[in-house]
Image (cartoon, grey):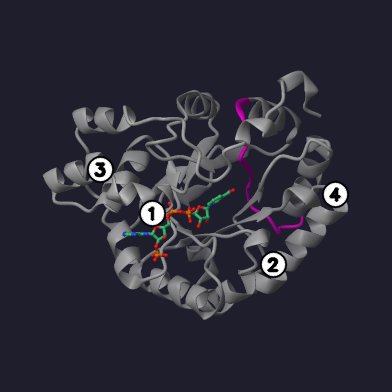
């Protein structure tokens, strides 16, 4: 089935389910992206840091560019104007494309004024190299500042999101300001697939645990970008589409929250009071 899209505040339509590519490298990366595209994926999530732009390039070569959605990210230590432009140009060269659909600030960096970074991103947008801009790993305070200083709409905040880290306040804040959350590590990096509460719900619907986890996030209005390297996993994840979890099961998954971060347990250190963010 076709992957549904979500309308962003810029007016663009992003496929709600994409392929995450962190740790996909070398031939495995090219092959996974190739299989994904054959299966009907059109949204690829990458980052300058992942070092795999050049491995994604052969898989997207020859594909109708207008049918693809490519997101990449600028590392937090490259957020000055000239660095943002250089990272973007290198990314486009390595990906073999003229533009990315979405460019994100990968993590906040308090040493560089956000206005400078968003100014550079607006220049890239003006030059046709970047269609939409957004952020990643931003707290409510960071998102508030970003919306204030960016001339372009901040279309998404890509953050860790799964049943053990159910970021209720951040989700409510972002979605009420039309900044759609992109859920990263939506399978808890694989750990949640064995959770008895998830496997029980999966059994009830005759679905797999991955499909339940992705369905839960999609049903909350988020974009999901599970990483998968094999055809069975890539195919399985598409099975999150086209059915619904009942309210009682959504609530049961909701109740699993432990505020447990897998990616960066010290995440809170990245936050600052709004007044101190430049
Ligand atoms: N912005 C950021 O700072 C940030 C941070 C982390 C992640 N991300 C993005 O989010 C993406 C996803 O997050 P993630 O890679 O951390 O973890 P994830 O998507 O939660 O989990 C990936 C793991 O689940 C396995 N898997 C995938 N589909 C499966 C299925 N149907 N059945 C069983 N196992 C399955 C994968 O195995 P196989 O590889 O063997 O298929 C892999 O081990 C990343 O790739 C990246 O694009 C962004």
Q: Nearer the viewer, mark 4 or mark 3?
A: 3
Whole-angstrom CA distance, mark 4 to mark 1, is 37 Å
Q: Which stretch is magenta?
A: 127-140
Secondary structure found at label 1: helix
x, y percent for residue 191? 37, 50
Determine the CA span between mark 2 and mark 4: 17 Å
| Left or right of residue 231, residue 128 in this image | right
Q: Earlier in the sequence, mark 1 or mark 3?
A: 1
226 in relation to 7, above or below: below
User: For residue 132, which numbered disc appears in the image?
Assistant: none
Query: Tag 2 or tag 1, which sits nearer the N-term?
Result: 2
User: Which tag, 3 or 2, sits closer to the chain's start?
Assistant: 2
Residue for badge 1: 190
Query: In front: 180, or 22?
Result: 22
- Answer few, some or many: residues within 10 Å of disc 1's Cα (few below 14, many 20 plus, some between 14 and 19): some
The tag earlier along the polypeptide, 2 or 4, is 4
């Amino acid at each position: 089935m076709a992957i549904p899209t979500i309308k962003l505040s810029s007016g663009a339509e992003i496929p709600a389910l994409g392929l995450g590519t962190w740790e996909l490298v070398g031939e495995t990366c090219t092959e996974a992206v190739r299989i994904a595209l054959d299966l009907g994926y059109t949204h690829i999530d990458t980052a300058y840091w992942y070092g795999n732009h050049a491995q994604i390039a052969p898989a997207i070569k020859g594909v109708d560019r207008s049918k693809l959605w490519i997101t990449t990210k600028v590392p937090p230590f490259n957020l000055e104007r000239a660095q943002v432009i250089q990272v973007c140009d290198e990314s486009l060269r390595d990906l073999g494309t003229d533009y990315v659909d979405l460019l994100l600030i990968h993590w906040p960096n308090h040493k560089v004024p956000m206005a400078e970074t968003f100014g550079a991103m607006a220049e890239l947008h003006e030059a046709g190299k970047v269609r939409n801009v957004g952020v990643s790993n931003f707290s409510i305070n960071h998102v508030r500042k970003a919306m204030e200083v960016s001339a372009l709409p901040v279309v998404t905040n890509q953050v860790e999101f799964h049943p053990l880290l159910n970021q209720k306040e951040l989700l409510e804040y972002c979605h009420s300001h039309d900044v759609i959350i992109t859920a990263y590590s939506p399978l808890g990096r694989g750990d949640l697939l064995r959770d008895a509460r998830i496997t029980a719900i999966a059994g009830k619907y005759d679905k797999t645990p991955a499909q339940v986890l992705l369905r839960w996030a999609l049903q909350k209005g988020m974009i999901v970008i599970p990483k998968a390297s094999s055809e069975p996993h890539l195919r399985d994840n598409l099975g999150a589409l086209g059915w619904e979890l009942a309210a009682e099961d959504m609530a049961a998954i909701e109740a699993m929250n432990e505020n447990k971060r897998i990616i960066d347990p010290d995440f809170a250190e990245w936050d600052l009071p709004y007044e101190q963010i430049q």
